[in-house]
Structure formats: C-alpha cells, structure tokens
Image (cartoon, rainbow, N blue to C red):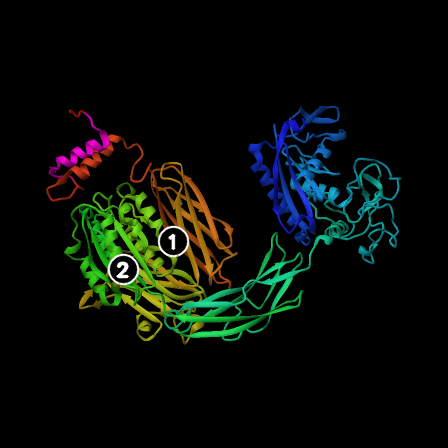
Amino acid sequence: MSTSDGFVIGLSKVLDHGPASDRWNLVLVAEGFRAVGMPKFHNEVSKFVDKLFNTRPFDEMWCGINIYRLDVASDESGADEPGGGECTGANVFRDTYFDATFCSGGTQRRLTVDSALVLSTVVAELPEYDEVIVVVNSDVYGGAGGAVGTYSLGFSPVSGNGGVEIAIHELGHSGFSLADEYAYGNVGTYGGSEPWQVNATRNTDKNTIKWGDLIAGPTAVPTQSNPDCSQEDPNPSPVPAGTVGAFEGARYWPCGLFRPEFNCKMRQLAEPFCAVCERQIRHVLEEYLEPVTVTLATPSIDFQDIPEGMGGVGVTTYRAIIFEVGSCSPVSLQVTSGPTGGFGLPLGGAVLVNPGQALTQGKIWISYTSTTPSATANGTVTVEAVETQETWVIPITANTVARPTAAAALVLDRSGSMNQDAGDGTTKISKLRQAVKTFVDVMLPGDGVGLVRFNHNSNIVEAVDDVAINGGTVKTTVDGADFNPGGNTSIGAGLEQGTDALVDAGAGYDVKAMVVLTDGKENTTPLIDDVSGSITANTFGIGLGTPANVDVGKLEILTGTHEGYLLITGALTSGELFRLQKYFLQILAGVTNADIVVDPGGTLSPGYVHRIPFPVTEADYGLDVILLASEPRAVDFRLELPSGGFIDPGVAAIEPNVQLVSSPNVAYYRLGLPGLPADPNSSHGGKWHAVLRLGKTVTTDAVSVQSHRSRMPYAVLVHAYSSLQFRAKLSQSGFEPGSTLMLTATLFEYERPVESGATVWAEMTRPDGTSKGVAFSQDEPGRFTALTTESTVGLYRFRVRATGTTSKERPFTREQTLTAFIGRTGRGEVPGTSDLCRLLECIAREGAKHKDGTTDCPGQWNIDWKAYAECLRKHCGEIGRKE
C-alpha cells in the first residue's frame, strides 16, 4: 500500500481564472480509483466544482480560484476499512496509492491518507498549490481536514448528507482554518485557552468577542446557553436563523465554547456557512481577485438584409450588444442614451451581469423591424458600466431586402408501382397528384416551382418558374398522361434532371430545393450515389409506402447531406387520408422558412361546429391557416379572433392583410399580422380559433358543390411566418434492432436562443402501434436533445413538439414530424436477407421484365438471359464453369 500500488497519470486544469502564480489553487486528487475508473473521478470533480460555485461566498470570489484535477491510478478500488475494537469496518484492505484508511485514530468516519506523499506528489505537478483535497473512491461515509482534506463518496446513514458536502466542510478546515462547531465528542466544560480559529470562542463579553461587529444591537450574549453539559444542547434556536450571537457548544465541547450562529456548515453539512465563516473565506481569497473588467465584444451592430414581412407588416429581429465581464460581484450595464434611428430596446435598457463559473457575458438587446425593400436605418446607442464608469457609443445600421424567394423542383416517381394501392383503396399516383396540387396551391407568390418525372428515364416536364405563372400548368400536367405510371426506377436520373431544372432557373431565387418522391428502390442507372455529389440544392425526400420497399438508407444520406430530411409515409390507411399532403406542406414550410404551430384533425358531421384553438404570438408576422378535406369548398371555414370577432370570406374580400384561397384540394387563409390593421390589438397575439361547419353550397369555376350531408374527415394546419423558429432533426446510430435514435431541436426567438420557459418533447409511435413519450433535455440555450433505443422492426413516427412563452410572455406551440426506420443491416437490406434472397432480387429486377416493361407486379415474364447470368456471377461466383 504505497506508490508501488499505482501510478500518477497527470494534472489537468478544470477551472481556469488565470496563472497559478496569481490565483488560489485548489487541487483535487484521485485515490482508490483504478485507471479504467478515471471517468468516475472526473464526474465527481465536476460535481464538486458545481457545488462549490453554488456555495456562498465562493460564488462571489470565484474568479480568484483555479481548480485542478490530479489523476492518480491505484491498483485496487476503495480504501482500507479496518474492523474490530472501535472500528466497525468490513476489515478489508486495498492496495491504493495514498494508503487511504477509515477509522483513523479510532474514529470510524475519520478518513486519512499519507499526507506527506500526497503533498509531495502535488508539488511535483503544481508547486503553486494552495489547498489539496483527496477524493476517495469509497461508498463508506467519511472525511477529514488537516494539511490535506479528504472525503469519500458515501453518505451519512443518519443525516443523508455526504459526498461533496463533506468536501466543502473539510475545505473549511484545511483551506480556511475553521473549527468544527458541533459539540459531541466531549462532556463537561471546556477549560483551555482561547481557540485560535475565528469561529469558536470562550469569550462572552459582547464588547470584546471576536465577531462583535457582526452582532446586532439587541442580540444578547450569550444568545443560548446549554443547561446540561453532559450532552449537546437539543433545544432549538431562540432567535431567527442567520442571527449572529454566541451559542454554547463548539469544537467538540457542549459547554464553555461558543459558536457565532445557531447553525453553520461547520456544524451540519447541509447548512450554509455562517457569517463569520463566510468572512474568513473572503479574507483568504480576496487577495487573489483582480479588478473588474468589462470589454465590449461587439463594437457595432448590423441588421444586414432583414427581409420585408407580409401584408406590409415588417419582420422584427434582435441583435445583442455583448460585453465580456470579469468580476466576482454583479456588474450593472445600462443604456444612458438612444438608441436613435428607429431601433428599439425590446428587453429593456439595463442588465445586471452576475458572476459565472467562467468569463461572463452581458447582453443588451437591440431590435429592428424591416420596412420596404432598399430601406436603410442608422443610429447609435450609449451604454455605461456602472461599476467601472466606462462608456461606449455603439453604431447601429440596418437595411431591408425583399422577401427571400424559393424555387422548388418536384422530382416525382412515375414507375409502374405507382399504380399500386396506397393502403386505403386509392392508388399511389392519385395520392401524389392530390399532394402536389395542394403544395402548388399553398406556395407563396413569387416563389418558383418546376416538375420532373422519372421512371427508368427522366424528363423536365415543367421548367421552374413563378408559381403565379406556371402553377396552373403544373397542376394540370401532374394530372395528365405524362404522369401515368409505367417502367422501372432510376432515382438518380430524376435527381439529375431536378438539378438541371434548378440550374436553368438562374440566380433569381434565394433558396433552391428539390423534393424527391419515390415508392420503390432504384433498379436502373444512374443511381443516387452516381449523382449526389453534383447536387447543390437543399434536398428533401418522401418515401411513399413501407420502408422495406424504399431505399431508406440511400435517401437518408442524400437528404441529410443536403440540408434536408426524409419522411416515410407507411401504408396510407383510411385514418391517414392527408398524411402525404401534410408531408408536402411540412417540406414547403421548411423551404419557405415557416413554422408549424399546430396540426390537428377530426371529422365534421352535419349540424356540428368545430373550434380548433391555436396560439399566435407577437413574434409571428404572418399566418397560413390551412384546411385539408375531401371537398374544402363545402366547409364554412372562418377564423375567430382573440377578441371574439371573425375573419370570414367577406372580410377577406375587403381587408388587404387577409387572403382566402379555396380549391378542390385545399382552402386556406393567408394573413399578414395584425390581420386587421384598424384593430391590431385584437387581430395579432392571443388565442385564435379555426371554426369549421358543414353545410355550405358554393359555386367555383362554374362547378357547384352541394351541401354535404355525411361526415367529412379534415385536417387543419397552422403555419406561422415568425421570428420564433423551431427546427427538429433525427439521426440514427444504425438501422439494426437496438439502434439509438437521436433527436435534436433548436428554438430561437428574434435570432437569439430561447434560454428558458420552453419544453420540448416527442410523441413517438412505434411500428406495432404502441406509443411513448420522449423527453428532451436542454443542453444549452436554445438547443434540446433526446435519445431512445429501439428494437421493433419497422417505421417510427415522431411528432416533435415545443411549448413555452415568448419574451413578452405569450404562449406558443411549435411542432414537426420526423420518421425513422429500424430493421435493416445495411443500405437497402433487411435483417436475415440471405445471399440467395439477394440473388433472386437481382434476377427479378435485372434479369426479368414483364411484357409491359415493368418489374413490380406478377405477370408474364420475358427473361434476359445475359442479365440472369450476370446476377449468378455477381452473387454466386464462377459456379460450375467449364474451361
């Protein structure tokens, strides 16, 4: 049990406030940790640092402290636990580097080490050390002070306290010469000289007692006397907590010695330090503090290219003036003049910067609201740091640009399998046509759309152009013979043509995206891998059907590396009539930088009114409230304002900020907010409702739609154009059962991360229909993560949701759908797929075709024997070949 029982790994600095020569340096040393157990030691050090920072007065003195971690490996874990006599340990002994042992001096919880060896080891690594604490890897409760402090990881069976609480108590002894303030250990009355420690005294003269300056006038001294010197006084405090006086019982004696307060961390671990102990700690550490520093990190603020809003309503954006503050006490920053030039102070003009564990940032937020394209603004704001009396004048500039426009190339599968049932008795191609027409109907004017079809070949059917110009043609074309299914599948060919269509669109669009829909696996060149390197557009994928029939792995890699994502529909049963339309609309929201507020559904019955609530915030500057139904024109569809008034077709006809679009595929209200400029308070932030009722007869394009007398399923989607933005993503550690699904989400308000007041979670539906709630943790401001490990083979659907309140305390909701697939061992393979199965799949896809040219359904086959032989050679080698 010596240095032969382990080895020193090395020293690491875990809290850095400057050179060791200028700071109070605390070293935490590992004892009884094997080399493989060092991560556990590192975790315990992190716990200690967090606890120390949250213990007064260390938080106020924090920037005068450096903390180091000394990794020392022992041959065995734990510490010696002697048994017999006064020792109640397990009578086991461990080979550890510093010979840690309990029951030192006959006191079971007294935990000591070879202090001389500890100090010589620390000096070799850090000669400038000030204090050393040894962290002992044992679950037995114990610790000690002295030249070297120690603590174990155990907890008291009586109080339930221990671990880092012991450490900070022992640090009071070792680092700051504080006495224990508990009374047990002796009986009778202390008769010795005046204790040298600052927190224990035998003096009861209020005029000369050590801490007399902290005793309030009316407080008696002694404040509490022990009536029975054979034990510690069991009576409660006669004065309120925190009162400084003289309480009998200290330094192990029940009588004759007095402590400053009734309770203190030097008496009970869970208590804070008393005022006298706090003062002693400050006194030791104050010489290591440097003057307060405040540094301006953002010498100017620039709101560059802020887009115009909708309906004449501007987009509001925040930018922060950032100061880096080095201080162990709060620092006040305040605006003394400005901002000029029409800029605002959305969160006020003063901030109190509290000290942190590292260099702290103070932020004063400036706001700008866009106006009309080409408009500019200039101004200044003056900020003062009160404590240092420094002043800064920060220039502010801004300009407004036109709304960014987006071009979308719809790259659509028309192979033979698109004639198959989607799951509800409707063909896949019918679902696709409906979804594409919905997508086009909801696009913003000025955005571009183009159309590409692919099977084993690919064509640009409609060049990318303003949807106001070619949207009608796109809808007509996708309904026509050009998209009748037939042939094989070359997704790569579709991607090539989609890329060309976006290149041909020129530089007139700020965002370019491809939306690729397929229901099968590629079986004809060019393949995805052949062309993915040439794609520059944001790329989204939709797999129409079950994951086993779609190239999930290839499409996930494609979309994940091109700023998009993949959605798999699964079988579209009668309960999921609108899923494909929703997926297209969610992708449209992503392309146009909109956010999904809510996405509920239901079934309308004659005579009933449905009111679907949704929150609108001050950060939202535009809304699309979208109704999907088998015949939306037969629904009386209106919006109820927070004030109780309504926006209906009549209002939409006369209000410039309100537009109503109604078609056989979709109906929606598009609003710039506030919706009613003459009444902005009642038509912006608050709880809105979409109000639906059957029983309407309309005539549109000379086609009469009669009142519905039967039930009608529907879905309502609310998309916000907003300065409050939520984005979610999903990735997988693999595709085999037991893989981890990793979810991330970000939440920003006015381009600053949401720091508090938000909750993110996901509603996960497994392939077997069971559900699970998945909670997210906030890892840093505005960033949330969650993990779940799953084994059921099939499609997983996540409805990722966020709720909270804005900086103006308006409630908000956001959501996004994500999908994942478990069940494959590689890209395009299913667990258990044998070489024979892959051979047969190859023969079916490459060596045989139907007489009609397809490969996706039973029928009469024409055999391509050359391709058949190639499959045999590829998967079976040169079997039976004769020279």
Q: Give x and y (percent) for residue 364.
A: 56, 65
Given residues 603 and 278, the one toward you in this image is 278
Q: Which residues are magenta?
A: 858-879
What element does badge 2 sit on? helix
Q: Quadrant of residue 681?
A: bottom left
Left or right of residue 328: residue 789: left
Left or right of residue 134: residue 347: left
What element does badge 1 sit on? strand
Q: In whole angstroms, how far apart are the C-alphas of marks 2 and 1?
A: 30 Å
Circle 2 residue: 503
Left or right of residue 464: residue 821: right
Compared to residue 264, the image places residue 702 above or below, namely: below
Q: Give x and y (percent) for residue 682.
A: 43, 70
Q: Give x and y (percent) for residue 480.
A: 16, 57
Q: What's under tag 2, amino acid-wise? A: Val
Compared to residue 510, the image places residue 825 above or below, namely: above
Q: Residues within 10 Å of mark 1 (few under 14, many from 20)?
A: many
> Residue 122, can we see it?
yes
Circle 1 residue: 816
Query: Residue at (37%, 51%) from the top-left corner?
Result: 817
Compared to residue 548, the image places residue 56 above or below, namely: below
Q: What's under tag 1, amino acid-wise? A: Gln
Query: Residue at (72%, 38%) from the top-left corner?
Result: 148
